[in-house]
């Protein structure tokens, strides 16, 4: 038995077919963010998922259902998206079009919560009870796990750390209406924009990371982004005192550069009390930018009260 995961991101849509034991049978990245009529969007994704299943010799539709993760505020009970900010989805039904197209039950969650499940059950936070998972991509959000269950708050807007203020003086205005937000300072879009100003051309975050090898200005961009992330995370760590912080999403790859990793470690040491640091582990996601799609595939079981990965193996 397997399930399908769909992760709508700001620059691409990621698809995964995941077994009950966490094995990723297939993964595919589709360029571009979702847009237009959702029935057409999910019809196209059905074709892609069906082709992936055929190549992996799996039946279709997925017998374990499917999950959809989206960067935004989601009403899990109804399967509706309230707002996605950068994706432009406002007050729309995702579950209905997805179930009509895919022919199976579909669960809908925020991409940060979906990513948290991937590492909680099969990745960097396996064995931990309390986890902060950070989705660091075009935007920034967090999935909070307490007692191995996703934590939700009023209005489903818990974990929106991308809109915590990390710059006290006036910074660029965020789409949320505030200035100095973590996402506006350190999200992938912000890093790319600063890199473009330095390099004189349109660039991606990975372009900035490559240029940082011999360009001090690009290196400074990455170091400042990492420092901003540490500042934004520190209050959440003190408040929740988790066992693990996991950094996922495409931009988290910049922490593979030792200078950026040192910047985040330095600010963690400076801003966290000893009790919060003593047993805390901070690591990169075992799934990188695939975590959202892999975790989305786990959503039907998690929301049904099951614990993926316990007592079930596949050949």
Image (cartoon, helix red, strand yellow):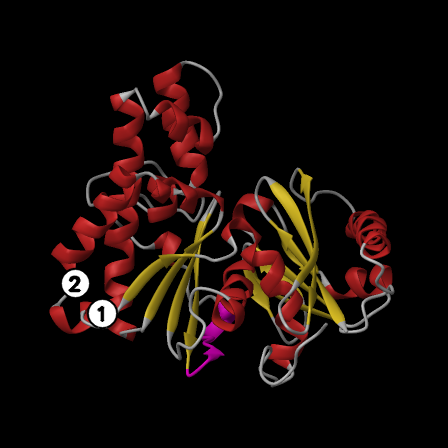
**Figure check: 160 above or below 172:** below
Query: Where residue 122 sits: x, y (%)?
Result: 53, 69
Which residue is outermost to the front? Answer: 315
Q: Is residue 66 left or right of residue 275?
A: right
Tell me whether the residue at label 2 lies in contact with that at label 1, contact meaning CB atoms closer than 8 angstroms: yes
The secondary structure type at the circle numbered 1 is helix
The secondary structure type at the circle numbered 2 is loop
Q: Which mark is residue 307?
A: none
Residue at the spot x=30%, y=31% of the render?
A: 221
Instruction: Give the residue pinned by disc 2.
Output: 272
The magenta stretch spans which residues?
147-156
Q: Quadrant of residue 274?
A: bottom left
Residue at the spot x=72%, y=72% of the render?
A: 315
**Figure check: 125 above or below 230:** below
Instruction: Give the residue pinned by disc 1.
Output: 238
**Figure check: 105 above or below 171:** below
Q: Is residue 171 visible?
A: no
């Amino acid at each position: 038995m397997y399930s399908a995961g769909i992760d709508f991101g700001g620059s691409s849509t990621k698809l995964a077919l995941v077994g009950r034991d966490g094995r990723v049978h297939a993964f595919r990245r589709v360029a571009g963010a979702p847009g237009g009529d959702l029935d057409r969007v999910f019809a196209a994704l059905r074709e892609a998922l069906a082709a992936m299943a055929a190549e992996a010799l799996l039946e279709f539709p997925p017998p374990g259902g499917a999950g959809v993760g989206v960067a935004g505020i989601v009403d899990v009970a109804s399967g509706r998206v309230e707002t996605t900010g950068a994706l432009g989805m406002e007050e729309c039904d995702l579950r209905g079009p997805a179930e009509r197209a895919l022919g199976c039950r579909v669960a809908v969650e925020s991409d940060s919560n979906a990513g948290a499940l991937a590492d909680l059950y099969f990745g960097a936070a396996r064995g931990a009870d309390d986890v902060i998972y950070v989705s660091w991509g075009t935007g920034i959000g967090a999935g909070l796990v307490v007692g191995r269950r996703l934590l939700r708050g009023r209005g489903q807007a818990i974990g929106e750390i991308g809109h915590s203020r990390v710059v006290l003086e006036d910074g660029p205005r965020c789409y949320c209406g505030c200035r100095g937000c973590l996402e506006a300072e350190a999200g992938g879009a912000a890093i790319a924009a600063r890199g473009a100003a330095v390099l004189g051309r349109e660039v991606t975050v990975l372009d900035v990371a490559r240029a940082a090898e011999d360009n001090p200005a690009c290196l400074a961009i990455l170091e400042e982004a990492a420092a901003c992330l540490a500042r934004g995370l520190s209050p959440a760590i003190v408040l929740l005192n988790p066992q693990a912080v996991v950094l996922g999403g495409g931009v988290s790859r910049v922490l593979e550069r030792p200078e950026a990793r040192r910047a985040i470690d330095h600010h963690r040491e400076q801003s966290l009390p000893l009790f919060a640091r003593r047993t805390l582990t901070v690591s990169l996601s075992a799934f990188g930018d695939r975590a959202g799609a892999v975790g989305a595939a786990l959503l039907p079981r998690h929301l049904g009260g099951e614990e993926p990965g316990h007592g079930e193996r596949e050949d």
